[in-house]
Amino acid sequence: MKLKFWGWVVLLAASLPTQAATKEARQDVLRSCAQQSRDQSFTGDDHATFMRSCLKAPDDAKPPAFASSGPQKLPPGQVIQPVMVQPAKTDRKPR
């Protein structure tokens, strides 16, 4: 039990720097777009339209790594085995 807990702690700790770097990168893009908008003196709807287009990912951008883990085709004859499920617990006694 302790090993399982520490495994999750290590996994979580390893993912934190990646999340922080991603957040900082997004904030840098937002700052850059906002600065460009101020430089061009956009206000109101023009500002909103510019920010949407500036923050939108380019059409040729690669999707995140986890996006490729979606449904995949299985080779013929291979079947996905369901995970073992425990039966529902019932607290009532049969009548």
Image (tube, rainbow, N blue to C red):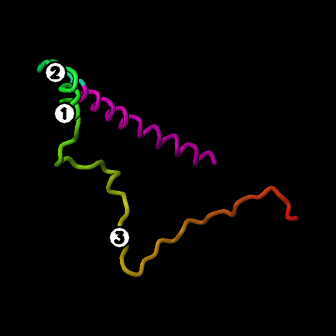
Q: Which residue is mark 1?
A: 54
Give x and y (percent) for residue 27.
29, 27
Give x and y (percent) for residue 13.
45, 37
Earlier along the polypeptide chain: callout 3 or callout 1? 1
The amino acid marked with disc number 2 is: Phe
- Give the spatial CA distance, label 2 vs label 1: 13 Å
The amino acid marked with disc number 3 is: Lys
Depth check, mark 3 against mark 2: the one in front is 2
Q: Which residue is mark 2?
A: 42
Which SS type dominates the magenta stretch? helix
Closest to the observer, 44 or 20: 44
Asked if the residues shown at circle 3 and circle 2 are in contact, with their CB atoms under 8 angstroms apart, the answer is no
Q: Secondary structure at mark 1?
A: helix
Q: Secondary structure at mark 2?
A: loop
In which image quadrant can residue 22 be found? top left
Earlier along the polypeptide chain: callout 2 or callout 1? 2
Q: Quadrant of the C terminus?
A: bottom right
| Residue 23 relative to residue 58: left or right | right
Earlier along the polypeptide chain: callout 3 or callout 2? 2
The stretch drawn in magenta includes residue 66: no
The magenta stretch is: 1-30
